[in-house]
């Protein structure tokens, strides 16, 4: 069983909905990220999604685009992101880390080389936004050989046939994109999300995380009632952006926000 | 670059003579290139687009409407013009020009926007979006949107908005909303990113008209098929005019839609050499260029695998060309495949060489070419003297240079 699968199984035993924060690696500075990751775990994060900066992030809204630009301005590469994970692992052997990003940096590094380096650094899985199952067979195979999961997105536009197919190739978890749009976009329609998540859960056996559009504690709690994991990205990244000039305050401020999210989700889990 | 070009390139490494050209395959691949590299939200809409496109491709009523529009609205067929004075000066092959510059809106772009807009209407979409660099595709999209009564939003990098004021005004006159894109390098690639983000968000009622033979499947094949009218006409016109096919085709390549439109109907004619010309900017050695086929390497961007301008970490790097229409870090995946197979040959022309050809054509033939097309002209000027007088070169004069008056006059120290 993979690290991610074990974590979800243990959460399920404890009837706990996972809280998965997303941050862009190296934003606003490469030295910020490792302390931030530890602070997030202490505040109740069950897995961490670490964004790999890419120059052309077509699925991201303005908040994560700017985070990407800040990281790229510091020269943060995929190799640097792996170093960040390695440094994090020195103190935290348990919390699963999933890299989230776009294909080209992995393509340039080479699938096999990436899989080897990611495993060595302590990465547990990847979510590559722009590689659908139709194009993903080689990457899936390279990651599987190293025991790494490849999570996939599902969208409001995914047909039942696509949901089944993605359920067959994805591992770790699937990530349901709650709104048609980019990260940090509009307001999600909770009724529609609940119906879709329930349809996905009846079609496939993997845990279902929900993200895109979870802006606050209230929405997080509502989503926790229907999903296996609540994924929060832009709401965290915009708080990081606000503290760009005082980076030492970032871990504390984000931890405070995660504690609020965790408390609200726990209340739903206990109900 | 540098050495005089040969009329026929080195033996094609992968090309099997006499093969039936069947690309893309069922998954949108041209060899290892092309494909469908997009977020999940777009996968089903792209499948719908593909189904609609494949249906209407064989629908006589759709084709009749498209043909009528190409004739009465665009002004097709565009003529073939023999550049006699220029050919005499070059003292080699006869140079013919395919006059896409005479089309409505001044370039080949409208061939494709008409096709896609008719498709959008049949699919029940009420809103079209487009990306633009120099503004030619934006103008062509705004034009067909005005004619069909569709809402139109055009994404354009902030840098391009500033350097192409006249086209921005044309689009606004036509009723389009021009959105100035401030992310990334604020040029064409970022406009494309922003158009993709709009499409993901408004996918139910919106049709994305991509302006070149790039993007996810089926765009590279669909745009090629709409632009192939250029090559079909050219083939018939050259046969009627000279009794034989041209010995060489020359076209500029940014994304590569005018080049593929010319090349595609000639692919099986293996005696016809095909030259795609990228922008060498300030020179390939300087790194300031837009020539991924000549100086880039394969990667994945904007929905397809192709040659890209990228750094060692896979980040897309900024490009440079005097012509905004060639200022793009990728290239259509079919060109990548034609390069690897050796069926087409790709070279590059610098800003200075293009500018010289721009002036030469104006003074010898009284035709003001677009700066994009001037790259093809500059290459033809190198190629012709290496060929016999009874041979011929057909250059795709893909657009007219009216839009470039400001750029050229500024370069030459004049203020209009």
Image (cartoon, coloured by chain):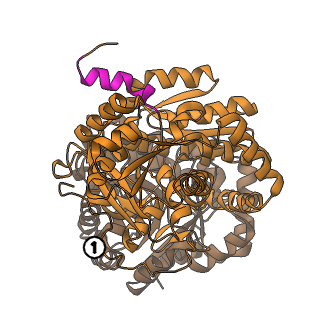
Task: Tell me: A96 left or right of B234.
Answer: left
Work out whether residue A193 or residue A10 is closer to the camera in this orientation and state it: A193
- Please tell me in which quadrant of the rendered image residue B13 appears: bottom left
Residue most extreme to the right: B61
Chain B drawing hue: orange
Is B409 included in the stretch rendered in magenta? Answer: yes
Circle 1 is placed at which residue position? A121
**Spot occupied by residue A26 in the image (x, y as percentages of width and height):** 28, 52
Image: B342 above or below A176: below
| Quadrant (top left/top right/bottom left/bottom right) for the N terminus of chain B | bottom left
**Spot occupied by residue B176 in the image (x, y as percentages of width and height):** 61, 27
**Spot occupied by residue B230 in the image (x, y as percentages of width and height):** 57, 50
Q: In the picture, which chain is brown?
A: A
**Spot occupied by residue B48 in the image (x, y as percentages of width and height):** 72, 59
Image: B119 above or below A266: above
Q: Is residue B255 in view?
A: yes
Q: Please tell me which residue is depicted at 26% across the width and 39% down the height of the picture.
A: B351
Image: B192 above or below A204: above
Task: Tell me: B221 left or right of B410.
Answer: right
Image: B366 above or below B225: above
Work out whether residue A17 or residue A208 is closer to the camera in this orientation and state it: A208
Q: Main secondary structure of the magenta part?
A: helix
Q: Is residue A101 in view?
A: no
Callout 1: helix, strand or loop? helix
Work out whether residue B9 or residue A202 is closer to the camera in this orientation and state it: B9
- Please tell me in which quadrant of the rendered image residue A209 appears: bottom right
| Residue range (magenta) | B400-413
Q: Please tell me which residue is depicted at 71% across the width and 46% down the height of the picture.
A: A189
Q: Please tell me which residue is depicted at 70% across the width and 63% down the height of the picture.
A: A197
| Quadrant (top left/top right/bottom left/bottom right) for the C terminus of chain B | top left
């Amino acid at each position: 069983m993979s690290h991610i699968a074990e974590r979800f199984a243990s959460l399920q035993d404890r009837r706990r909905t996972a809280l998965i924060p997303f941050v862009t690696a190296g934003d606003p500075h490469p030295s910020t990220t490792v302390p931030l990751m530890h602070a997030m775990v202490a505040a109740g994060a069950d897995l961490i999604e670490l964004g790999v900066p890419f120059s052309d992030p077509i699925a991201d809204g303005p908040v994560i685009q700017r985070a990407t630009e800040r990281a790229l301005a510091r020269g943060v590469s995929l190799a640097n992101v792996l170093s960040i994970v390695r440094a994090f692992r020195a103190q935290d052997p348990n919390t699963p880390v999933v890299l989230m990003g776009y294909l080209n940096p992995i393509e340039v590094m080479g699938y096999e080389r990436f899989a080897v380096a990611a495993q060595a650094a302590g990465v547990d899985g990847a979510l590559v936004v722009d590689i659908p199952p139709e194009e993903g067979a080689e990457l899936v195979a390279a990651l599987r050989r190293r025991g790494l999961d490849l999570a996939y997105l599902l969208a409001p536009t995914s047909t039942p046939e696509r949901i089944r197919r993605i359920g067959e190739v994805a591992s770790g978890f699937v990530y349901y994109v709650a709104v048609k749009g980019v990260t940090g976009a509009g307001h999600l329609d909770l009724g529609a999300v609940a119906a879709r998540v329930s349809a996905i859960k009846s079609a496939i056996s993997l845990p279902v995380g929900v993200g895109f559009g979870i802006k606050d504690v209230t929405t997080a709690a509502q989503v926790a009632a229907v999903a296996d994991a609540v994924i929060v990205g832009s709401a965290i990244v915009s708080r990081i952006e606000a503290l760009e000039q005082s980076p030492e305050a970032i871990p504390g401020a984000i931890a405070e926000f995660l504690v609020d999210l965790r408390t609200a989700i726990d209340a739903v889990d206990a109900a | 670059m540098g050495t005089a070009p040969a009329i026929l390139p080195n033996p094609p490494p992968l090309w099997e003579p006499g093969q039936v050209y069947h690309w893309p395959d069922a998954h949108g691949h041209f060899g290892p290139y092309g494909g469908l590299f997009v977020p999940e939200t777009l996968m089903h809409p792209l499948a719908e687009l593909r189904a609609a496109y494949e249906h209407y491709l064989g629908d006589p009523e759709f084709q009749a409407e498209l043909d009528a529009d190409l004739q009465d609205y665009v002004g097709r067929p565009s003529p073939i013009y023999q550049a006699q004075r220029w050919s005499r000066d070059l003292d080699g092959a006869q140079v013919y020009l395919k006059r896409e510059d005479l089309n409505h809106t001044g370039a080949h772009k409208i061939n494709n926007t008409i096709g896609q807009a008719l498709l959008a209407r049949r699919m029940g979409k009420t809103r079209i979006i487009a990306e633009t660099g120099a503004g030619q595709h934006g103008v062509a999209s705004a034009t067909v949107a005005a004619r069909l009564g569709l809402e139109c939003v055009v994404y354009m990098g902030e840098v391009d908005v500033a350097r192409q004021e006249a086209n921005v005004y044309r689009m606004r006159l036509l009723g389009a909303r021009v959105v100035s894109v401030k992310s990334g390098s604020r040029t064409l690639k970022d406009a494309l990113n922003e158009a993709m983000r709009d499409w993901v968000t408004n996918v139910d009622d919106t049709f994305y008209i991509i302006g070149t033979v790039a993007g996810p499947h089926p765009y590279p094949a669909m745009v090629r098929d709409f632009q192939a009218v250029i090559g079909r006409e050219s083939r018939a016109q050259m046969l009627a005019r000279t009794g034989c096919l041209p010995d060489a085709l020359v076209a500029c390549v940014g994304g590569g839609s005018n080049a593929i439109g010319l090349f595609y109907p000639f692919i099986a004619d293996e005696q016809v050499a095909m030259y795609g010309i990228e922008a060498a900017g300030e020179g390939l050695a300087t790194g300031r260029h837009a020539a991924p086929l000549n100086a880039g390497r394969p990667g994945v961007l904007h929905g397809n695998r192709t040659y890209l301008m990228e750094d060692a970490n896979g980040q897309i790097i900024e490009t440079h060309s005097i012509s905004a229409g060639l200022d793009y870090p990728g290239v259509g995946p079919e060109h990548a495949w034609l390069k690897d197979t050796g069926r087409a040959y790709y070279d590059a022309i610098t800003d200075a060489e293009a500018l010289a050809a721009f002036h030469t054509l104006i003074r010898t033939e009284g035709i003001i070419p677009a700066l994009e097309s001037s790259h093809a002209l500059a290459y033809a000027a190198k190629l012709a003297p290496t060929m016999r007088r009874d041979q011929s070169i057909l250059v795709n004069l893909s657009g007219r240079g009216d839009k470039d008056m400001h750029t050229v006059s500024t370069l030459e120290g004049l203020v209009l």
